Amino acid sequence: MGGAWAQSGVTLSGIADSAVRHVRNEDLGGVTSLVSGSNATSRFIFRGTEDLGGGLSAGFHLESGVALDTGANTTANTLFDRRATLSLASKQAGELRLGRDYVPSYTNWVRFDPFSHVGVAASANFVSATPVGPIKSSFGASPNTTTRTSNAVQWLMPAGWGGLEGGLMWASDENGTAANGQHKVKGARLGYAAGPLVVSGALTRTENNLTTAGHFDDRVIAALYDFGMVRVSLALRRFEQADARQNNVLLGAWIPVGNGEIKASLQRVSFSGSVGAASLDDNHARQLGLGYVHNLSKRTALYGTLSHISNSGALAYAISGGASGLAAGGSSRGVEFGMRHNF
Amino acid sequence: MGGAWAQSGVTLSGIADSAVRHVRNEDLGGVTSLVSGSNATSRFIFRGTEDLGGGLSAGFHLESGVALDTGANTTANTLFDRRATLSLASKQAGELRLGRDYVPSYTNWVRFDPFSHVGVAASANFVSATPVGPIKSSFGASPNTTTRTSNAVQWLMPAGWGGLEGGLMWASDENGTAANGQHKVKGARLGYAAGPLVVSGALTRTENNLTTAGHFDDRVIAALYDFGMVRVSLALRRFEQADARQNNVLLGAWIPVGNGEIKASLQRVSFSGSVGAASLDDNHARQLGLGYVHNLSKRTALYGTLSHISNSGALAYAISGGASGLAAGGSSRGVEFGMRHNF
Amino acid sequence: MGGAWAQSGVTLSGIADSAVRHVRNEDLGGVTSLVSGSNATSRFIFRGTEDLGGGLSAGFHLESGVALDTGANTTANTLFDRRATLSLASKQAGELRLGRDYVPSYTNWVRFDPFSHVGVAASANFVSATPVGPIKSSFGASPNTTTRTSNAVQWLMPAGWGGLEGGLMWASDENGTAANGQHKVKGARLGYAAGPLVVSGALTRTENNLTTAGHFDDRVIAALYDFGMVRVSLALRRFEQADARQNNVLLGAWIPVGNGEIKASLQRVSFSGSVGAASLDDNHARQLGLGYVHNLSKRTALYGTLSHISNSGALAYAISGGASGLAAGGSSRGVEFGMRHNF
């Protein structure tokens, strides 16, 4: 139809990001690999907006994750796994958005992570592959909603409400099953940005056929302050299901240096409560990440990152890309050098 | 190669369409869901044509279905499931088209359905998931050819043959099996359009390893007349395999109203003949669809649609998106509100 | 991000190529089919480069194979199966390229095959589906590296080093298994082009968990001379694993004729050595290919190709698209007529 409309507008854009990574898991030796998306996830995007007049606009956004190391789709049979949305937006009343998108608690979290949830020092290292606790009992092997959900209806606040920002999300389980990745989702986010300060909170509540004892709650509160010489963030996230709780705390810093930026994060995860008769206490882990990003242009950067995870209790969190089989309480170290190119 | 050719031409275009749907199947309660493509199937298209001089042109068309609610591919591992064709066209002699495309009987049918075979009031509701009759016995769980076929060679009539239109299609089974979706196809379509009148007929004949007793025939004859205040269509379709026949009759209407259009369709399906010793008589169903499309611009529209199906005999046709398990002879009701955006 | 950068650059291009093919395998009758990519593999490409100043540039290349006859992805769940790379290039020092790409020995081979490794007369007919010898014992059903590898780091020589060309490739097995297509790869290519002469050699060495007895070596040496009225090539390729060797010899010719080109190739494959106690001697096959490509424009061509394979010993190489079950020592004949369109 594109050719038929004089005002037709669609943009093809994306990010190509690849790095060489070395990960050494305790007692398991080192593994070197080529990885994709360590500064920003590799992707391509089809998107556009149309001005409908009177402050109204229509828009769509189709975003596909790409594994730049292998050419593979990042999600089998879901081309637009990162985002697939259709929007009707009003400058006064905000945006109504339909489709697959980030949940409010993820949106609220990722902004405060200097490593944007990706790479060796990703805060994602303490989210996925959880060996104990609420994520495992709420989702098992099903797609969890700590990042995205399909089938969502959202309302997003317009710009210019006195520094307020945020929105509401709702998704039906469509009579489906957790194995299909279907679930009820209700979520909300409310933030405030003024000058150097950002404060923000969000909740995402998920129900599926594995959460019959209640629901899975994902709460985030976070703040960021830009001191000029350094930008500092603090973010708290709690995953909760029945009597089990996982608590993530992130302290982040960005330090501008010439054409580049030094980034650092310290993250701690701890568990509390229980799953059945098993107590989750005394399980905690810590990650320290340190990186430098050097901009070759506005679109292209080189980067290097170091990360170290130490576990205690039954935990065995590891940096992705290492040898499998890290023992409980073991440590994981990683380093990577890469390049990101926006197109 | 694109950059290397001065005349290089490829267009990226498509449709993003999403709706909130509620379906209530008799005795099974209601299900609310987010759906994709209820006014027009969500898709993206790469296509282009090259003028070769002397009335000749080359062209290609790659079209991919998108589930806008989930980001999923509409067909696993077949990116260009909607169309993948290469053409050599002459203004005088017509177009030779190679690849995956609509079969003639579908092309002939969809034009006369006010709901374009999609949404709660889709005429597709009486085609797919047939519990009895020729479609089931000819294709089982294999991809059927009531919409498209792969591996086709087509000739399409040029414009300007005194209002005539149509073409011929042929596809080899390539020594394959029905389970692979491979089959022999022969089809033809011939229509006539003059002023407010369109009349048209088509036949698609399919043979595969499940139609050893003969072949599967899909015949359509249809007419449309534009009275100005209302456009009215009548279409008859018969699926036939061995002694089993399915007959679909569609009466459609389009009524322009300001920036929008009211659409209505009444469809009836009935079966006759037998499968083995089992008679198919006394199985019929009826669907009434009513909708309104409001254009916000040439590219963007809001729409709402109502639909009601009543079954009798062994039939249990239901609107997609409801709870499964509708009993034979039960009814299905649906409503949806959505938005379509062409890009 | 595209819209956000003034210099943003991404090109969508590709090739649409389809043909009608008839293959007759000895004693098995003929099969007619529609095929994709017989002159050049059907594909689409997203790619771009950015000038970083000082002779430096960044670039990416995402290339996806398309089955134009069916719309299918050519590799399930690997959208960019043909190439997915990110590059940092210097006019003086060459290009550092990360990602999925051709291995050096393939790059070195395909250039000397008049049929570019595709179609009824493809030199690929003697590579894939090997019934005996090193490819089978090194890769089994796993993806082999005679064409491409994922996870590669490459250095490619810059233009202008006195006619020299080539590069180095390295890929980690990432602690993976052959079944995952993961393997160590080391490769190198060195060529020299001056006026009408090209000479070139390459080696690709692969290790995976099926090559514990050693490694799989893929060596190519080749030359090409352009006499004006005819361009002639000679290429030798050896696959070697433990005591098994496969030797391919290709003699090629291109003869310009008006707006078109006649192409011919004679290829012979022979085996030597042994797999375990079984000798591979006395297994050989021969393929003769003859074709004509007629250019309708710079972007579009029609073509026709003939091919004949004769096997001896245990070999049963056949042209793709025929009936399966060719007996050892049997012959295979094929013909196809098609069209290629660059966009």
Image: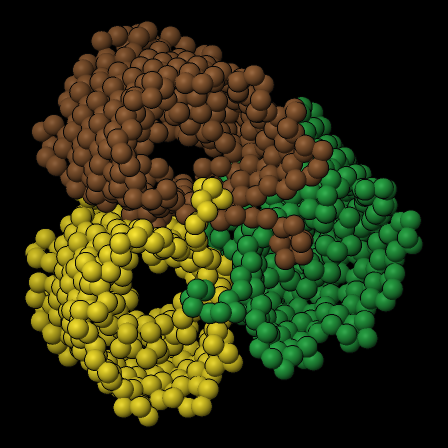
Chain colours: A brown, B green, C yellow
Identity of the residue drawn at 32% across and 32% down = A118
Which of the 4 image quarters holds residue A265? top left
Give the residue drawn at x 78%, y 54%: B112
Is B267 on the left or on the right of C317, as rendered? right
Percent from the top left, x then y, of residue A218? 43, 17
Q: Residue at x 84, y 57 (%)?
A: B224
| Horizontal and vertical percent position of residue C77 | 39, 48
Is C104 situated above or below A239? Answer: below
* Image location of residue C145, percent across then percent down: 23, 59
Whole-percent x, y for residue B36 in the image: 61, 40
Name the residue furthest bottom: C229
Which residue is rendered at x = 11% and y = 58% of the image?
C215
Q: Nearer the viewer, residue C104 or A178?
A: C104
Q: Is residue A53 visible?
A: yes
Quadrant containing the N terminus of chain C is top left
| B108 versus A342 height, above or below | below
Q: Nearer the viewer, residue B194 or A264?
A: A264
Q: Is residue C250 left or right of residue A184?
A: left
Q: Is residue A177 visible?
A: no
